[in-house]
Image: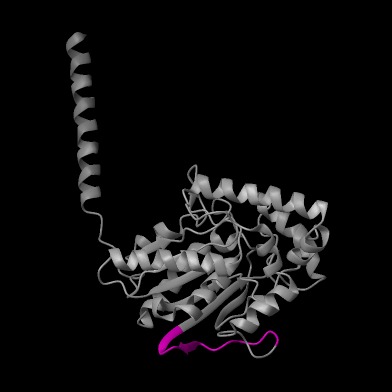
Amino acid sequence: MKKSLSKRLAAGLLAASSVIALNAQAMSQQPEPSGYTETQHPIMLVQGILAFDSIAGVEYWYKIAEKLESEGATVFRAHINAFNDSIDRGEQLITELETIRASHPGIEKFNLVAHSQGGLTSRYVMNVRPDLVASVTTMGSPHTGAPIADLLNNAFPQDSLLGGVYETVVDAAGSLIDALSGDDVGKGDARALTAEFTTAGAAAFNAQFPAGLPQSYCGEGPASVTLNGHDIRLYSWAGSDPFTNAADPLDYLFGSTSLLFLGGKSDGITGQCASHFGQVIRDDYKMNHGDLINQVLGLHSLFSTDPLSLYRSHANRLKQAGL
């Protein structure tokens, strides 16, 4: 009886050891990155509002950087204010790009891939420091403003009691997000952020930095621009469906904010035409503002493109363009 038990234990240990050895061998033989996403210049992911990298294990760019890196891309994530205007955030990004370039021999320029407000932040950078930029891609960026900003600016007027409360609360939230994300970028400015995305604020920003914008309403911008002798490729894409997955809590937020568009198509924050910048890849993906960054936890429409595949394909597009 004891011998039988001993034999069984020995056989079990041998089987377990074999499985472990096979797994180890398989792991050691995993293929090298395919190079499909290996661009000439590294990719810098530029966040919109909230602008954290990772907080308590929650990523802003959910699984996106990992997907790109797994097939050869070099990816960085921006460290900028959660709440601030695009000029201040752009200056923070310029400092970070310069630091990376100085510490990584061989890096000269970056492919800026930007979500929401990150698109305007990137536009500022390409205008004032085109030597740092190989391309700018914006996803769901409200280049001509967002109705939610007009609503907030009117509901909480500057220099009013309600406005003061709004600024205090949102500034405090922004400072907390920056601290939790490890972003030592100074105090943000909620009022400047809100004002920038009002109809008037966006018009003022666009008058100062018009490069890449369409010349007509809902048109397509130029595929490239030359700024101070530097050629920069321009792209954009967007979603047009605010409610895509009932299990995603963000869908209920974007479903509500989409009512501000009075029947026009949007991703819940950005109008379809407001997203146009440079070469428009598509402006009608069945995605909302959160789906564009694979949130929440990768939940998206079962009847549309996987957001991760969009980033993968775009990295290859940049590669094929020599970027």
Q: Quadrant of the N terminus?
A: top left
Q: Residue 162 vs residue 59: left or right?
A: right
Given residues 297 and 195, the one toward you in this image is: 195
For residue 33, say whether it is visible: yes
Q: Residue at x 25, y 61 (%)?
A: 32
For residue 116, say whether it is visible: no
Instruction: Where is residue 81? Give x, y as percent.
Output: 55, 57
Residue 304 vertical placement versus 123 (above, below):
above
Q: How is the image coloured?
A: one colour
Q: Residue at x 20, y 33 (%)?
A: 17
Instruction: Where is residue 197? Give x, y as percent.
Output: 69, 69
Residue 75 occupies quadrant: bottom left
Q: Residue 289 vs residue 74: left or right?
A: right
Residue 73 occupies quadrant: bottom left
Instruction: Where is residue 16? Give x, y as percent.
Output: 24, 31
Given residues 317 and 139, the one toward you in this image is: 139
Q: Quadrant of the C terminus?
A: bottom left
Q: Which residues are magenta?
A: 217-232
Instruction: Where is residue 47? Give x, y as percent.
Output: 53, 62
Q: Residue 118 vs residue 154: left or right?
A: left
Residue 125 vertical placement versus 78 (above, below):
below
What is the number of callouts on the image?
Answer: 0
**302 inside magenta stretch:** no
Given residues 42 and 63, the one toward you in this image is: 42
- Residue at the extreme front: 159
Given residues 6 and 226, the one toward you in this image is: 226
Residue 215 vertical placement versus 178 (above, below):
below
